[in-house]
Image: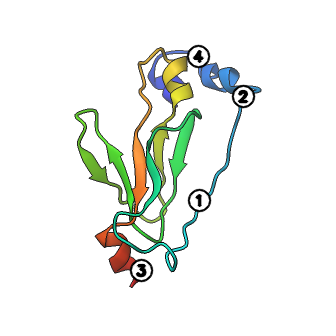
Amino acid sequence: MAALGMGIDKDTFKNKMRGGAHLLAPTGSDLEKFNQEGTVFAGFHYDIAFLTIHGKSRYPGLSVWTREWKKKAVRIPEGCLFVQAGLSFEHITGGYVLAGFHEVVYNEATRNAYE
């Protein structure tokens, strides 16, 4: 869909990713052990992959940054996914699409959901 939206061949990105590194990395955190506000589970970063796809979590804590450097909490509705561009997507598009910065931190909303 991204290729079609950019007016290029629909197989462009699929062909560029052939033979590339792909990672499925479901993450988890032990909230019984790590339950202090401010605990960082995944510090501020962008991913090197083509796309990062976040599913709905049982606990809040995922934040993203806008291009104006405003931090925003992510709330993913039931049945939806949150998709961010990774560094590979940024490189393939020559910076037309930028990698998304994100982090996961134990915060007040995490504590409220955990309790």
Q: Amino acid at mark 1?
A: Thr
Residue at point 46%, 40% (across, down): 84
- Image quarter for residue 75? bottom left
- Give the numbered dot on residue 114: 3
Q: Is residue 58 above or below residue 24?
A: below
Q: What is the residue that sits farthest to the right in this orientation?
A: 19
Q: Position of residue 89 (x, y in %)?
A: 53, 26
- Name the disc covering residue 9, or none: 4
Pointers 4 and 3 in contact (CB under 8 A)?
no
**Label 3: how many Cα within 10 Å (few below 14, some 14–19, many 20+):** few
Badge 4: residue crowd in 10 Å (few <14, some 14–19, many ≥20): few
| For marks 1 and 2 on the same chain, the one whose residue lies earlier in the sequence | 2
- The first of marks 1 and 4 along the sequence is 4
Labelled pair 1, 2 in contact (Cβ < 8 Å): no
* Distance between mark 4 and mark 2 Cα atoms: 19 Å
Instruction: Report how far apart the C-alphas of labels 4 and 3 lie in the structure.
Output: 46 Å
Q: Determine which residue is flagged by label 2.
A: 20
Query: Separation of disc 3 and disc 1 at Cα?
Result: 17 Å
- Rounded to the nearest angstrom, the CA distance separating label 1 from label 4 is 34 Å
Which one is earlier in the sequence, the residue at label 4 or at label 3? 4
Q: Position of residue 105 (x, y in %)?
A: 39, 60
Residue 19 vs residue 101, the one in the foreground: 101
Q: CA distance from mark 1 to mark 2?
A: 22 Å
* 90 vs 28, nearest the viewer: 28
The three-letter amino acid code for the residue at tag 3 is Tyr
Residue that label 1 marks: 27
Q: Answer above or below: position of 32 versus 11.
A: below
